[in-house]
């Protein structure tokens, strides 16, 4: 993946963020990959890139409560 692809990516914040800068943003990349970053870094911080399968497993785990703290 190139830095150019990340620079041109269309980033989305959750509608539940209420316009705050303390959330994450995602972007769809080529090959079905998904990029994830911290919105307060304004593009200067690290970006984590997941394959389509990794992202689907993560979303599935969230929906199933796998990451809920007790």
Image (cartoon, rainbow, N blue to C red):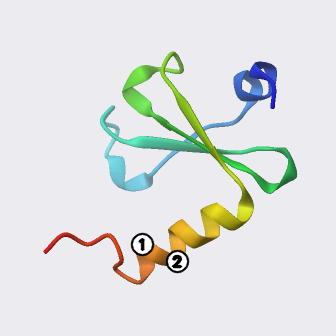
Residue found 76% across the figure and 26% down from its top: 8
Local packing at callout 2 (Cα closer than 10 Å; few below 14, some 14-19, many 20+) is few
Local packing at callout 1 (Cα closer than 10 Å; few below 14, some 14-19, many 20+) is few
Q: Which residue is mark 1?
A: 62
- In what element is the residue under mark 2? helix
Position of 12 with respect to 50 (left or right) is left
Rounded to the nearest angstrom, the CA distance separating label 1 from label 2 is 5 Å
Position of 12 with respect to 21 (left or right) is right
The furthest residue to the left:
70
Give x and y (percent) for residue 28: 72, 47
**Residue 27 position by quadrant:** top right
Vertical position of residue 56 compared to residue 41: above or below: below
As drawn, the label of residue 39 is none
**Residue 70 position by quadrant:** bottom left
Residue found 35% across the figure and 55% down from its top: 16
Q: Which residue is mark 2?
A: 60
Q: Nearer the viewer, residue 48 or 4?
A: 48
Do tag 1 and tag 2 residues touch (Cβ < 8 Å)?
yes
The furthest residue to the top:
44
Residue found 52% across the figure and 77% down from its top: 60
Vertical position of residue 32 compared to residue 7: above or below: below
Q: Quadrant of the N terminus?
A: top right
Q: Nearer the viewer, residue 8 or 34?
A: 34
**Residue 53 position by quadrant:** bottom right
Give x and y (percent) for residue 61: 46, 75
Give x and y (percent) for residue 13: 48, 44
The furthest residue to the right:
31
- In what element is the residue under mark 1? helix
Residue found 37% across the figure and 26% down from its top: 40
């Amino acid at each position: 993946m190139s830095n150019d692809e990340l620079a041109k990516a269309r980033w989305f914040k959750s509608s539940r963020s209420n316009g705050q800068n303390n959330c994450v943003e995602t972007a769809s990349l080529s090959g079905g990959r998904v990029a994830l970053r911290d919105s307060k870094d304004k593009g200067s911080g690290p970006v984590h890139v997941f394959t389509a399968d990794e992202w689907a497993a993560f979303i599935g785990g969230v929906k199933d409560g796998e990451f809920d703290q007790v």
